[in-house]
Amino acid sequence: MSRAFLPSLVLGAGLLMVFPLCLLAGQVWIDPFHATGPNALVILAQLRLPRGLLAVVVGAGLGASGAAMQGYLRNPLADPGLFGVAPLAALGAVLSLFFGFAAQPFLLPAMALAGAAGGMVLLALIASGSRAGLAGGVALFTLTGMMLSSLAGALTSLAISVAPNPFALTEIVTWLMGALADRSWHDVAIAAPLTLAGLAVLWRAGPSLDALTLGELAARSLGLEPSRLRVLMVLGVGLVVGAGVSAAGIIGFVGLMVPHFVRPFTDRRPSSLLLPSALAGALLLLLADTVCRLLPLAGGELRLGIALSLLGAPFFLHLLLRLRRGLS
């Protein structure tokens, strides 16, 4: 029996237990024994259920994509947000808001997907052409990710500074904070199929990622085709990150944190991390969104992207300090 089975079973059971409880929590609490009134049914069916499902979908995609990127780049710091994939997806979505394309229901997700795929293509090209060792590769990919994130951030700031009208400016700034508030079944219908397709592609890449942990030369001797793996990674990560960004905006650090949480309970192979990371990411995002919904703030609820950044930044610092101790 795979060592990934037990953590996946525990996380799946926890998700099934927590999900209905999260639907009841909010500024308006719903009594599960008296949830038959019209207001309660509308809140559950039209507001909290699509929001909860979207949290599960986006969290699963971000968790699995982080595990896949860490296996592909052999870099414990790899994350779609830190390595420029999510910022470039956000840039694509921001451009759709800037030019008014978001009025068309499928153009914003399409441009977010294009941005995420472009970021993955750049990282994949650098990964395939690097001759550095593992330590040098970590530094190279980190610097490349910083460059892509800085470029996407600069272009996004430019779009904000020259926004054509106050409405577009408000839409861009609010969307960049990352949130699942006011999402509908339409958003679920767009994000869920794309995320499931991306997860299926990443699952197909799992055996090749396992072979890559032995080193590129050994992996080639086992039949690894780098170009095929590169295509799978571009498609898989591009689909899940683009879908998540198009539905919820920028939500960082999920793909960085989740694989580190579940890795000690598996055999540490990338393929064994994909399913537990997806389930843990779904559970983390669902719980974080519920907490944001419960916190009383004068201007509304705490944005999900801000909350996870406050959680993820100290975790990232912890990883950096641990790597520093390991290299010294």
Image (cartoon, rainbow, N blue to C red):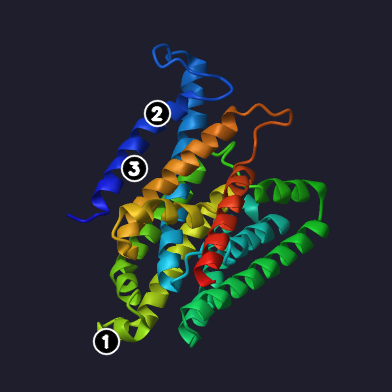
Q: Which of marks 3 and 1 is nearer the N terminus?
A: 3
The type of residue carrying mark 3 is: Leu
Q: Name the residue under label 2.
A: 20
Camera-near label (2 vs 3) is 3
Residue under the image location 35 percent in, 54 percent down: 264
Q: Earlier in the sequence, mark 2 or mark 3?
A: 3
Q: Nearer the viewer, residue 280 or 36?
A: 280
Quadrant assignment for the N terminus: bottom left
Of the pair 90 and 215, the residue shown nearer to us: 215
Q: Crowdedness of circle 1 by 10 Å Cα count: few (<14), some, many (20+)? A: few
Q: Where does label 1 land, which residue?
A: 221
For residue 93, side relative to residue 158 (left or right): left
Is 84 located above or below residue 302 in the figure? below
Who comes first in sequence, dot 1 or dot 2? 2
Callout 1: helix, strand or loop? helix
Residue at the disc numbered 3: 11
